[in-house]
Image: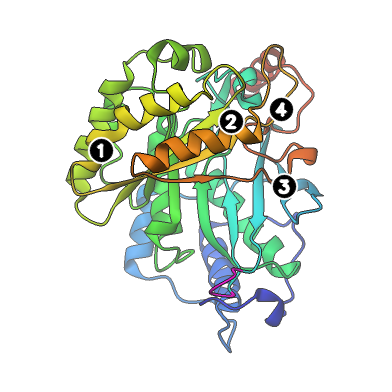
Amino acid sequence: HQPNCAATPVTLSPQTHTPSSALQYLEELAAERSALHGSSAVAPRRLTERTAHVLLVTNLGMPQARVKKQVVSDCGTRKLLIQLHDGLQVETVLIPSKVHSVSQKQRTTLCVSSQVGCARGCVFCATGKLGLIRNLTCEEIILQLFFATRVANEEGLPSISNVVFMGEGEPLNNARHVSAAVALMTSAQGFQLSPRKVTVSTVAPSVAHIERMAALPSALAWSLHAADDDVRRRLVPTQKCHVHELRDAFVKVLAQRGPGHHLFVEATLLKDINDSRQDAAKMAHLLEPLRAGVSDVKVNLLAYNDNSFEGLVPTTKERIEDFRDVLRSAGYTCTIRQARGTPQSAACGQLSGGSRMGAGEKRVESLQRRST
């Protein structure tokens, strides 16, 4: 159990501070994590040979970046707008939980971004409207957790125990940097997060992309949205593989990972598009082979967070509950996720880097910066 960090007051440098080196970064990180874990002494630890090797392999160096803006929702959700060294911006979201009715514990989940923009083009997602601008580096992903840890500590939030790659971008289209970031998040010399509490979520661009997930020290999530190919292509226009081919790839990966692992399956439901009882029955049938092996499937449902996109309307409370009931009657664990931070555009599918600049302009500026 990690104590509420409000009980461990620590004086930290301003949010705009960026460590000047990887060594300084890990020293400060170790100090902050000691504080969050309630250690009596807040002192940097010496780097081990293993950490030095990781840093050498990943060429980790902290880029110039700063928290440009923070917005807070009534529910306590906090969205950080981080300005990167090249002027591009990316968003990350802290989601503190309520006190659990049984355990009486609290936690904060951090939703991190893996890219500026996204190439997958999901029609209900604000990030998808930007197009892909560029990948984030390993250190830019880690920096989101670094800043968020500081905010949680300074503002008395429950400590960050869960990280989900569900912000801007498709993680598997940036697999090298995402893999390196996950390794550091779960490292004993870094953030010390449990691999089971770091979740990499993917729309699954291809079978090959899925197969590369086998060795990730994290939980896996599939943004499925629809079990019917035609419906899914309407929602995810870049889909090239049949859904049963993607499912079979997940079956293979879960078998390689062995007992004790499960797959989260996510579905954003839109009215009269993918929210009927028939859609739910198709999903139950599609996912059945995933339960035949050594793993389990947990389905998370979420009503579309309205981005005012033409022709798209959130499903109703009654229909999402019907969808859940169909899956539960088929034997699946199924929950309905409550949207957090919607008024501040901090909810799932609403992140867009906080920029009013058009996607084309941002891509041109990014290219121009690289050439100068």
Identify whether 22 is placed above or below 351: below
| Residue 80, percent from left and from top | 72, 47
Task: Report helix, strand or loop for mark 3.
Answer: strand
N-term-proximal mark, 3 vs 1: 3
Q: Amino acid at mark 2?
A: Arg
Which of discs 1 and 2 lies nearer the camera? The answer is 2
List the residue tagged with mark 4.
306
* Residue appearing at x 56%, y 28% in the figure: 269
Tag 2 near tag 3, CB within 8 Å: no
Q: Amino acid at mark 3?
A: Leu
Residue 243 lies left or right of residue 354; in this view the side is: left
Whole-angstrom CA distance, mark 3 to mark 4, is 20 Å
| Residue 131, percent from left and from top | 59, 18
List the residue tagged with mark 1.
290
Whole-angstrom CA distance, mark 4 to mark 1, is 31 Å
Identify whether 138 is placed above or below 20: above
Which of discs 4 and 2 lies nearer the camera? The answer is 2
* Residue appearing at x 58%, y 38% in the figure: 167
Task: Report helix, strand or loop for mark 2.
Answer: helix
Q: Is residue 304 visible?
A: yes
N-term-proximal mark, 4 vs 1: 1
List the residue tagged with mark 3.
80
Q: Amino acid at mark 1?
A: Leu
Task: Report helix, strand or loop for mark 4.
Answer: loop
N-term-proximal mark, 3 vs 4: 3
The residues colored magenta run 100-104
Identify whether 263 is placed above or below 364: below
Q: Residues within 10 Å of mark 4 (few under 14, many from 20)?
A: some
* Residue appearing at x 66%, y 63% in the figure: 98
